[in-house]
Image: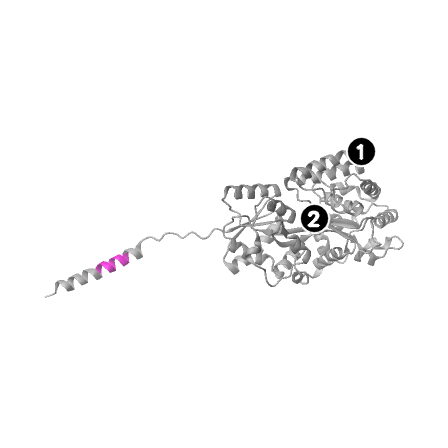
Amino acid sequence: MVSVRTVLAGLVILLIVVAGLLILLRPREEVAPPAPLVWASTQLAPAAEQAFVRELLKDFTGETGIEVEFVPLGYAEMASKIEAEVTAGRVATNLIGALSTEIEFFVARGWVEDLRKFGALGGRTFFESVERASIIRDSKAYVPWIIGTYVMVINNKAFDYLPPGLTKEDVIMGSEKWTYDALLEWAKRVADATGKNLAGFPAAPGGLFHRFLHGYLYPSFTGYQAKEFNSLDATRAWEYLRELWKYVNPASTTWDAMAEPLLKEEVWIAWDHIARIRAAITTKPDDFTVAPVPAGPKGRGYIIVLGGLAIPKGAPNQDEAWKLVEFLTRPEVQAKVAEAVGWLPTTMEAEVRVTGPVGKIVEGSSRLLATKDGIPVFIPPLGGKGGEFSSTYREAFERIVLRNEDTRKVLDELMGRLKEIFESVGVPLS
């Protein structure tokens, strides 16, 4: 006869088996995949550049398993987004890609983390000047990511018409003989010989000619971007530009970028951002030379456009965001970015990896950065007032150069506007 103890033991085993089966047969709850990192950026926003970034991020995801959503934004939209998230304490953006001056504005308002808590990034040596620039208000505000500047691109045919005393080597190396006066004489000689005005600038509303005015012409003639806006030196700068414009292709006011006019030989001597002349260099690398800009009475003014990677204050998943920063600043990744979209690397190890046609852009830009008489400037950190700042210089150009209004009158009138712009954001005239 089976004992009661044996029966009970069998029942216990049966219950255990049934319970196990019920657990196995119970519908499993779906485990949601982790949300992707949100990388908001004011840079690499054009469609072709976005496509490149998204392909690049596939490599990061394949390596780390971390998905990334790349969100290109205009600066005003970016500022509003970060302010709203940080203020509400519900930060959804994990990483910011923006210009140094844009991030500087964020730092002043306490919207970004001090990145020193993550330690140093190994295997890369950031250029000293850009590393120094990333320290704002005793905080490591961003990691230097991409560098841009503006250069001269010259059709090699133009070298046949150099003015006496100026050599091709002077232009390429940015010697003391390569000046704005030399540019004027050169443009005139080309026009006289060909019957065409073959100097050119991207002076359409969508072009970056305002950067030439405040970041190149003004520092070269006055030593400053805005501080001496209506000075006697500034008057001389505008008188110079008015004279130069006699030899500038009038279609310049319709051009957003100079690559196409260069390729069509509508211009032989052009100025533009390195990313916007890239197509000309990569399409016909043997036809063009990339050179530093000329020097003026005060020196060789030029803009350093520095892009950085920052983490919003209180952002979630900061360790994962730092892994993305590490990936994006690797020398091999920076070299890919340079070759694909034309932005310069921020590390020594990456610079030497860029070869071929894009290497010509890197080489020409590096020579500009190395000139002894250089006056490097950054775009003023004016936040949402940046557009008003740019439009002030454009208005001065249209009134003085295109409409031939009295220079002093125009500059005195617009100086008041400039002061109001800087005062409204608490930034001194620079």
What residue sits 35% from the left and 53% below the top? 28
Query: Which residue is label 1 attached to?
Result: 409
| Residue farthest left in this picture | 1
Mark 1, other Cα within 10 Å: few <14 / some 14–19 / many ≥20: few
Residue at the far front: name it. 138
Q: Nearer the viewer, residue 40 or 415?
A: 415
The prevailing secondary structure element of the residues shown in magenta is helix
* Left or right position of 406 against 34: right
In percent of width and height, residue 310 lies at 58, 51
Q: Is residue 322 above or below residue 237?
A: below
Residue type of the residue flagged with mark 1: Lys
Which element is circle 1 on?
A: helix
Q: Which residues lie in the magenta part? A: 14-21
Q: Residue at x 78, y 36 (%)?
A: 411
Q: Say which mark, if any, is on residue 194.
A: none
Q: Secondary structure at mark 2?
A: loop
Q: Are the two marked residues, 1 and 2, in contact with CB atoms closer than 8 angstroms?
A: no
Q: Amino acid at mark 2?
A: Phe
- Within 10 angstroms of label 2, few (less than 14), some, or many (20 or more) residues? some
Relative to 414, residue 185 above or below:
below
What colouring does the structure picture have? Answer: one colour
Q: Is residue 326 magenta?
A: no
- Label of residue 378 in the image: 2
How many dots with numbers?
A: 2
